[in-house]
Image (cartoon, rainbow, N blue to C red):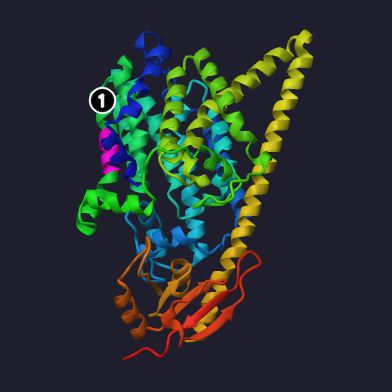
Amino acid sequence: MGLSVAYIQQRGGTAVRGLATPFRELLPSGRSDPPRSVTRTPRGPALALVGVAVGCAAITSTAVPIDLPLGWDEVVYVSQYAERAPAAFFSAPRSRGVSLLAAPVAAMTGSIVALRLYLLAVGTLAVVLGFWPWLRALPRPSAVPVAAACYGTLWVTGFYLNEAMPNHYTAMGALAATGWFLLAAQRSADGWAATRGPLLGLVTALAVVGLMRPSDAFWVSLPLGLAVLAVPAWRYRALLGAVAVGAAAGVLPWLVEAQLSYGGVLARLHRASEIQGGTEPTFSLGLALSTLDGPLLCRPCTNPAVLWPTVLWWFALPPFALLGVAVAARVRATGGALLAVAVASAAAVPYLFLIGYSAPRFLQPTYALLSIPVALGFVGAADWVVTRLGGPSRRVVAGTAAALLVTGLAGHLAVQGALLAWMGQLHEDRRQDLERLTEELHAHGVRPPCLLVGDQAIPIAYHAGCASGASSGANKTADRQELLDQLRRTPSAVLVLGDDDPPSWTRDWQEIRVPGSRRSDDWRVLLSPRPEP
């Protein structure tokens, strides 16, 4: 969060100076694709896009329990404006976008089901809005619902569609920003009246990216800004200004909060770097590959093994993306396909080359953007099959190709569906511990106002209605003595998972044992003595 900006400033930006070259080489004479004659959104593909988004929501509702308790990061975001429990510690790398997104429901009710349903609706709407500008930006709008299906059927999309996490919205913001950029570039020659809509869409989409993850706003806006400078037909000051204004508007709240609450922007960047383990050149491609079948966060990545069926689609991405670029060249849409690939590549840079851990959600923006050329590749392959089926001499070859394509898609959907169902069940089992611990705490008098410290204190405290505290680590809330004073004045408990040793100062505290789920160890809960008046 913000660390990639600092790193580029330190290194002078040399790693990205050559990004403009592909636009010069692949767009003849520096000219962009010609404007499309279609000025209205095509009805058929638009309805198909909405249908795909609704289908994705149905898949999520089926595979992921609608009452799934909030995870650690979700609790941090949701608790900032929640009525259920005090706000959890908000560390330096985080931004407020998800908290603002969840606030309308979280501030009114502590119901997990209500929050999940709301987030499912918003996440589904984000799919429609993310792909919407591409219905007019692509010469083949029929590829857009195909692209949405490519992105929406990934297990990571289905799992996070109703979660209070930023990556899905970052992905849809980056995708929409690229589409609106292309529309604005095509219409700039027609004057402000024709361009203001796409420009406003571009500013809004980039602002969403910045609100969710400020560092992603930098990496997404970088190739867009370079594209303005590299392609003569796209050199409009309004277009470059929209990129800069959108990214700045999204990042501004993070910068203001840094100045008011963290001692300045540099101090917040430094603290964020400490929490994230530092930002330096590394190679995390293998770690990203190992998370394609989980876990949700690989830090540290001690078990990089991965089931081979779950990685086949990763290796199919490059050839289908190249095929999509080739198809785009035939229909004079090279600029759009190349821009999607460029933004997708830039969005992946910090997660593959600057941090030493991984999570499957980190690359959601890359997957969303690559779905555009991949869908064009699918459409091109389908056209080839239909064309060849008309010639009897090649009917066998075309039929075989069609069978292979359908078989591959069916296998991919089966693998992704199985992974999604498994992830939903896995985390439902693990998060059942939260409910058992909450019941035990309330039964032993630890009720709001109360304080929890120890293992998983942040998510457990939220579900129990307590505050959480720590005297060390990334979520430090107070010095050790200050924390001890708080524990003496408040109904409190220390949470210990498995065979970990409890703090020495709890030796006189009452201990109760709570059985863990079949996927986790048992818990020990150490209850504080009666609080001092």
Compared with 11, 30 (above or below) is above
Q: What type is the residue that disc 1 sits on?
A: Trp
Q: Does the rendering let one see residue 437?
A: yes
Q: What secondary structure is found at the residue carrying circle 1?
A: helix
Question: In the rendered structure, does residue 249 fall within the stretch colored magenta?
Answer: yes
Residue 179 location, x and y as percent?
A: 41, 30
Left or right of residue 405: residue 252: left
Q: Does the rendering let one see residue 447?
A: no
Q: How many marks?
A: 1
Residue 110 location, x and y as percent?
A: 45, 69
Q: Nearer the viewer, residue 478 or 206?
A: 478
Q: Residues within 10 Å of mark 1 (few under 14, many from 20)?
A: few
Query: Picture quarter containing residue 186?
Result: top left
Q: Nearer the viewer, residue 186 or 297?
A: 297
Q: Specify the principal SS of the magenta part.
A: helix
At horizontal 49% and vertical 28% (from top left) the residue drawn is: 42
At horizontal 67% and vertical 37% (from top left) the residue drawn is: 412
- Quadrant for the C terminus, please: bottom left
At horizontal 62% and vertical 38% (from top left) the residue drawn is: 311
Compared with 114, 33 (above or below) is above
Residue 213 location, x and y as percent?
A: 37, 46
Task: Name the residue beneath numbered marker 1.
Answer: 192
Question: In the rendered structure, does residue 366 fall within the stretch colored magenta?
Answer: no
Residue 24 location, x and y as percent?
A: 37, 14
Query: Picture quarter containing residue 22?
Result: top left
At horizontal 43% and vertical 37% (from top left) the residue drawn is: 353
Compared with 526, 261 (above or below) is above
Compared with 531, 226 (above or below) is above
The residues colored magenta run 244-250
